[in-house]
Image (cartoon, rainbow, N blue to C red):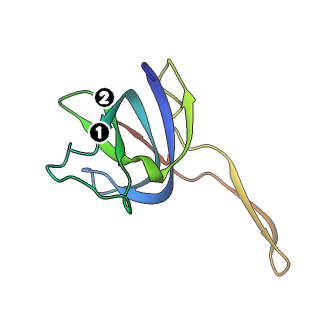
Amino acid sequence: MKGNYLITTDEWFVAPDGKQYHSAWGNIEILGDDILGIKTNRMSVNWFAKVGDNDKHIIIAGCQIHYAVICKEKPNTKPSESWSADVANGLKKYKPPSRIYIAQ
């Protein structure tokens, strides 16, 4: 994999700005398991994805990547429409802030 990707993770993560995100966008580089200075065993993930550039990036364990979508241009980071629904309240539309961490 090379180029800019939008990576959706299985779990939320906190970025350096203190906000919670569920996706990261940027140039991707696949790394081995020695990137953090430890050698993993067969019970652990054995690869990581570096998303972003050398000055600003996030390292995501391969087992946490749910989707990887090629995305050459920076994705929309403005609030966009979302919704929730339940029996008591019906359909509720709202515009949450972006959940995409821009790692470049």
- Kind of residue sitting beneath label 1: Gly
- Pick whichever, 98 or 16, lies toward us: 16
Residue that badge 1 annotates? 32
Residue visible at 49% across and 48% down?
99
Residue positioned 45% across, 59% down in the render: 12
Q: What x and y, as percent, mark residue 49? A: 36, 38
**52 sits to left or right of 74:** left
Camera-nearest label, 2 or 1: 1
Could you tell me which secondary element the residue under label 2 belongs to?
A: loop
- Tell me if residue 32 comes above or below residue 13 in the rendering: above
Residue 42 lies in quadrant: bottom left
Give the quarter of the figure containing the N terminus: top left
In depth, the one of 51 and 56 nearer the eye is 51
Residue most toward the left? Answer: 37
Q: Is residue 79 left or right of residue 12?
A: right
Q: CA distance from mark 2 to mark 1?
A: 21 Å
Dot 1 alpha-carbon crowd within 10 angstroms: few under 14, some 14 to 19, many 20 or more = some
- Which residue position holds label 2? 104
Q: Are marks 2 and 1 in contact (CB under 8 Å)?
A: no
Q: Label 1, secondary structure: give it.
A: strand
Q: Quadrant of the C terminus?
A: top left
Q: Is residue 34 left or right of residue 83?
A: left
Residue found at x 35% / y 48%: 46
| Labels 2 and 1: the sequence-earlier one | 1
Place of residue 82 in the rendered image (x, y in percent of width and height, measured from the top left)? 68, 52
Q: Amino acid at mark 2?
A: Gln
Give the number of the disc on residue 95. none
**Please, which residue is most extreme toward the front here?**
42
User: Residue 44 at x, y = what percent?
Assistant: 36, 59
What is the tally of numbered marks visible in this picture? 2
